[in-house]
Image: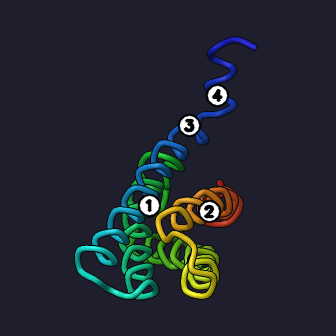
Amino acid sequence: MNIKQLHEKYKDVIPYLFFGVCTTLVNVIVYWIAAHPLGMAVMPGTIIAWFLAVLFAYVTNRKWVFHSEANDRKEIGKEMLSFFACRLATGIVDWLCMFLFVDVLGWNDMVIKVAANVLVIILNYIASKLVIFRKK
C-alpha cells in the first residue's frame, strides 16, 4: 500500500485524532480550571468542561474532519442537534466515570478525566462516522 492509498484510507481518522486530542485538551484544561483554581465540585466542573469541549468538537469536526455538506439553517440545526445528542450519550460515560471513580472511590480526578476521555473519543468517532456526518 502506497502513501496515497494510506492517506485515502485514513483521511478522516488522522484529522479526527488530531482534533480529538485538541478536544480532550479543552475538556481536561477547562475541568482543571473549574475544579482546582475555581474550587468547583467534580460534577459541575465536568459538565462545564463537557459543554465547551462539545462545542469545540462540533465546529472542528464539521469543517475539518467530516467536511459537512449541510448548508442551510435547517440542515445545520439537525446536524448540530444530532451531534449534541450523540455527545450527550458519551458525555454520560464521562460523567459516570468521574462520579464513580473520583466521587465514590476517591481516585485521582485528572487521571480518570484523561482515561475517560480516551474512551469517549473512540465512542464519538463511531457515532460521528455512522450517525452524524454519514454521507447521504
Q: Which residue is mark 1?
A: 57
* Relative to 67, residue 111 above or below: below
Q: Residues within 10 Å of mark 4 (few under 14, many from 20)?
A: few
The residue closer to the viewer here, 31 or 26, is 31
Q: Which residue is mark 2?
A: 124
Q: Are the two marked residues, 1 and 2, in contact with CB atoms closer than 8 angstroms?
A: yes
- The percent position of residue 111, horizontal first and vertical second, equals 53, 62
Mark toward the start of the polypeptide (2 vs 3): 3
Q: Which residue is mark 4?
A: 8
* Relative to 43, residue 29 above or below: above
Q: Residues within 10 Å of mark 1 (few under 14, many from 20)?
A: many
The amino acid on which the numbered mark 1 sits, given as a three-letter code, is Ala
Q: Residues within 10 Å of mark 2 (few under 14, many from 20)?
A: many
Tell me how far mark 3 sits from mark 1, CA to CA. Answer: 15 Å
Quadrant in the picture for the C terminus: bottom right
Tell me how far mark 4 sits from mark 1, CA to CA. Answer: 22 Å
SS for dot 2 = helix
The amino acid on which the numbered mark 4 sits, given as a three-letter code, is Glu
The amino acid on which the numbered mark 2 sits, given as a three-letter code, is Asn
Residue in the image at 69% along x and 31% along y: 9
Q: Are the two marked residues, 2 and 3, in contact with CB atoms closer than 8 angstroms?
A: no
Tell me how far mark 2 sits from mark 4, CA to CA. Answer: 21 Å
Q: Are the two marked residues, 4 and 1, in contact with CB atoms closer than 8 angstroms?
A: no
Q: Which mark is residue 14?
A: 3
- The percent position of residue 57, horizontal first and vertical second, equals 44, 61
The nearer-to-camera label among 4 and 3 is: 3
Residue in the image at 57% along x and 80% along y: 106
Report the side of 9 relative to 63 (left or right).
right
